[in-house]
Amino acid sequence: MIMTSTSFATIELINDPRGFATLWLNRPDKNNAFNAQMIRELIIALDQVQGDASLRFLLLRGRGRHFSAGADLAWMQQAADLDYNTNLDDARELAELMYGLARLKIPTLAVVQGAAFGGALGLISCCDMAIAAAEAQFCLSEVRIGLAPAVISPFVVKAIG
């Protein structure tokens, strides 16, 4: 059996010939924090998964100690200097990612270790199932700095029930 891998700068998509794929958040040096590039790459990878009829299951994982620390603080600081429309475009792209994962035609499982903060909690909430290590921590960390988790909240609320 030969596994195939699609490498991006911030993620990795590995297709197993047994009919499943593993989508890795791959910025362990940044605790897999999201930035615009990671969001774009995740959208592309999910489109590839959606278009692959041989896949029956998707695992979502994070390399390193943490699933994901949420948004990259350097990216957030840059966003503070952007105009309204550019920030709106970023929010729409994040929403496209969340909807793409939530509407994937195959079952999804998030495998969580360490931190799962902010947008990471949104990604997990978009999956059909999640399994977490005993030390995993979940939070909507953006509320601590006065930001509403507007894009991810609908998915989190739906997952909680």
Image: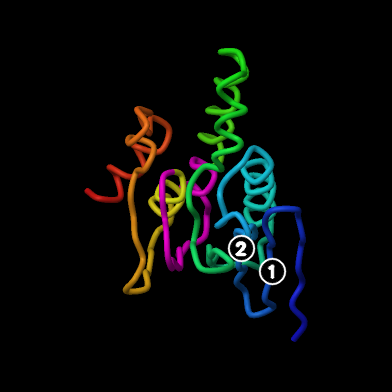
Q: Which mark is residue 14?
A: 1
Q: Residue 136 appears at what percent x and percent y?
A: 36, 66
Dot 1, crowdedness within 10 Å: few (<14), some or many (≥20)? some
Q: What residue is at 76 percent from the left and 55 percent from the top?
A: 8
Q: Amino acid at mark 1?
A: Ile
Which residue in the rendered view is the most extreme toward the left? Answer: 161
Between circles 1 and 2, the one closer to the viewer is 2
Residue placed most toward the observer, 50 or 126: 126
Residue placed most toward the observer, 114 or 121: 114
Side of 31 where 15 appears, left or right: right
Do the CB atoms of the residues marked 1 and 2 lie less than 8 Å apart?
Answer: yes
Tell me the residue that label 2 is attached to.
24
Q: Secondary structure at mark 2?
A: strand
Q: What residue is at 43 percent from the left and 56 percent from the top?
A: 127
* Picture quarter with the N terminus: bottom right
Q: Amino acid at mark 2?
A: Trp
Q: Residue 119 appears at what percent x and percent y?
A: 46, 44
The figure's colour scheme reads: rainbow
Q: In the displayed structure, would residue 111 be above or below residue 118? A: below
Instruction: Tell me how far mark 1 sits from mark 2, CA to CA.
Output: 8 Å
The span picked out in magenta is 98-118
Which residue in the rendered view is the most extreme toward the bottom? Answer: 1
Q: Residue 92 appears at what percent x and percent y?
A: 55, 27
Q: Which mark is residue 119?
A: none
**144 magenta-colored:** no
Q: In the displayed structure, would residue 135 be above or below residue 142? A: below
